[in-house]
Image (cartoon, helix red, strand yellow):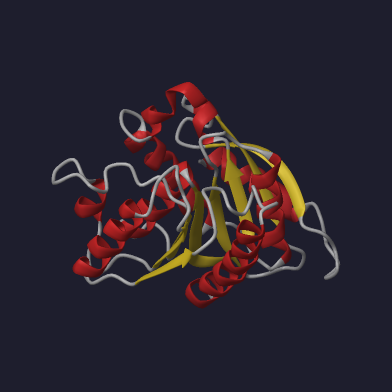
Amino acid sequence: MRLLAIAFHCLLASAVLPASAEPMSRTLKVGVRHNMEATLYTPAGPGPHPSVIVIHTSQGLTEADRQYCARLAREGFRCIVPAFLRAHGIAQETKMMAFTTERDAILADFREIVDELGRLPGAKPGAVGAVGFSNGGLFSVLLAAQGQVKAGVAYYGALVGVLQPRPGNPFLQSFTSASAPVLLLAGENDTTMGTKPVRALEGIIKSAGAPCQLIFYADAEHGFDRNNLRPGNHAAGIDAWTRTLAFLRANLR
């Protein structure tokens, strides 16, 4: 990650931004092997800024993910969004690899990125959170469970394995009373994941004595913040953004 640190340092040292400026963005190579493309968004001003890693869906890195990062940066968070599936050779039709054979390697990449984010010039030390969408929700939750971040948010998380017994259940293995707070945002009309997995996860977290908030949106579907033409999805997306900002501010500042 030395290459990442040098690139970040050069980025921050090369520009003086007025307080009203838009966040700066730059594409970098990150991860254990430095082969994962990511976009970093740096807020205006000297900081110190808390940091957030945004983790995309099984669709791969899209403009929606970049725009979400940019929105967080406008709110004062240094934000990075890595194209993690592509770096691991995972396509839509092989997405289950992210939950099984590649899960630990992907988590190692995220731990490396999180560690570097917290040590950047202008970063608030140790104040790193994670926000994951669907596939990415698995990883934002596990990063929080393992204490790798200070806060984890999962939008309609693809919680593969949550209904399994030990030792095949990564959530049962990971959550303890020392785990970071988790915010779970889900739609009651989610026909992709259903409501049972997220309720099971809430039970695991509470049984471990870790902090957890679960918010169900009555008329929302899977991907409610992206497929927001339906009124229920649109309202859920607005509320979820507001709750996410408040949650990150409370736990990272």
Picture quadrant of residue 230: bottom right
Question: Which residue: 45% across, 67% down?
Answer: 215
Q: Is residue 123 above or below residue 224?
A: below
Q: Nearer the viewer, residue 149 or 54?
A: 54
Q: Nearer the viewer, residue 228 or 65?
A: 228
Position of residue 103 measured from the top left corner of the image (x, y, whole percent): 35, 36
Q: Is residue 15 above or below residue 76?
A: above
- The quadrant of the picture occupied by the C terminus is bottom right
User: In the shown orientation, is residue 142 left or right of residue 250?
Assistant: left
Question: Which residue: 49% across, 37% down?
Answer: 31
Q: Nearer the viewer, residue 195 or 137?
A: 195
* Residue with the most extreme left position: 166
Whether residue 89 can be seen here: no
Position of residue 246 measured from the top left corner of the image (x, y, whole percent): 56, 75
User: In the shown orientation, is residue 160 left or right of residue 207?
Assistant: right
Picture quadrant of residue 141: bottom left
Question: Which residue: 57% across, 65% down?
Answer: 240
The total of numbered circles placed on residues is: 0
Whether residue 240 can be seen here: yes
Q: Is residue 185 above or below residue 115?
A: below
Question: Which residue: 51% across, 48% down?
Answer: 222
User: In the shown orientation, is residue 66 left or right of residue 58?
Assistant: right
Position of residue 237 measured from the top left corner of the image (x, y, whole percent): 62, 60
